Amino acid sequence: MLGRRCIPCETAMASPVFAFLLLREHPYGREMLQQLLAAGHVPTVIVEEDSAMAAVEGEKFLTRMAGYSVAETIAAQADAHSIALRAVPLHTSDALLELLGPLELDLIVFGGTRIIRGDILSHPLHGVINSHPGLLPECRGSASPAWSVFHDIPVGSSTHFCDKGIDTGDLLLRRELPVRRGMSYEDICHGTQVLAGTLMREALDAFADGRWNTLRHAQGSSPWPTFKNAPEDVLAVVRSKLADGSYEHLVD
């Protein structure tokens, strides 16, 4: 049975009741779920999107983190913790409401999904949250580590609420990732993924401690556009700046 345990955010002293969403076996979500489970934050249900896009996005992230191992599969983690694992063809609001609507959830946690809008965002009692592998509001959109280096924006990750925009919801946590001389683009991509999982874990810890009201704040505006996937010519500049030490935020 998929159950419910309602916890007011201001007085919570236990892990929230939440659903975990991701594209099927997404490396980003596998890392995040592993960290959440290690901290005792066990979702009521995991809902994967089983689509062609899921396969493409998964390969994209594996390429960005070439040389690094990936956390255990979602299927194995779900089985080890007796978590209900469901799949939908697409993570649309209607499909998710049909599946999650009967559940009284505190939160929905995104662990690497497509952009999801609609009524599902207002279904959980305390909202929908996402961890983004870039510093918000500066670096919204796709391929944040690449665009951060390209435009000399500090590298990092952020945990935020989801609204109808792209990476525009209120912030909970954000933290820079030190980029040291000699680090590669793959090192940075892996580092932001691990940091994103860490920030999500810390966000759920803060929920359990009733600290969200002190953490939540509006992002403000960004001087940069919402970025799209970085093409090869941009990646070539990124690799060159990391190799020759011209990225402005290197840490010695």
Image (cartoon, rainbow, N blue to C red):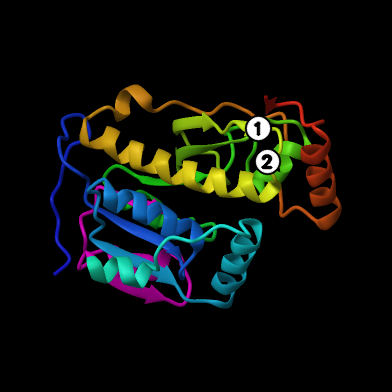
Seen at 33% across and 22% down, the residue is 214
Query: Compared to 35, does 93 lie above or below?
Result: below
According to the picture, the residue beneath numbered tag 2 turns out to be 183
**Is 80 or 211 nearer to us in this picture?**
80
- Asked if the magenta segment contains residue 221, the reply would be no
Quadrant for the N terminus, please.
bottom left
- Asked if the magenta segment contains residue 108, the reply would be yes
Q: Tell me the kind of residue under disc 2.
A: Met
Query: Compared to 134, does 102 lie above or below?
Result: below
Q: Which residues are magenta?
A: 81-110
**Is 72 or 199 nearer to us in this picture?**
72
Mark 1 packing: few (<14 Cα in 10 Å), some, or many (20+)? some
According to the picture, the residue beneath numbered tag 1 turns out to be 180
Viewed as shown, does residue 154 lie left or right of 168?
A: right
- Residue 146 in picture, x, y percent from top left: 71, 45
Seen at 65% across and 37% down, the residue is 139
- Residue 3 in picture, x, y percent from top left: 14, 61
Q: Tell me the kind of residue under disc 1.
A: Arg
Quarter of the view holding residue 172: top left
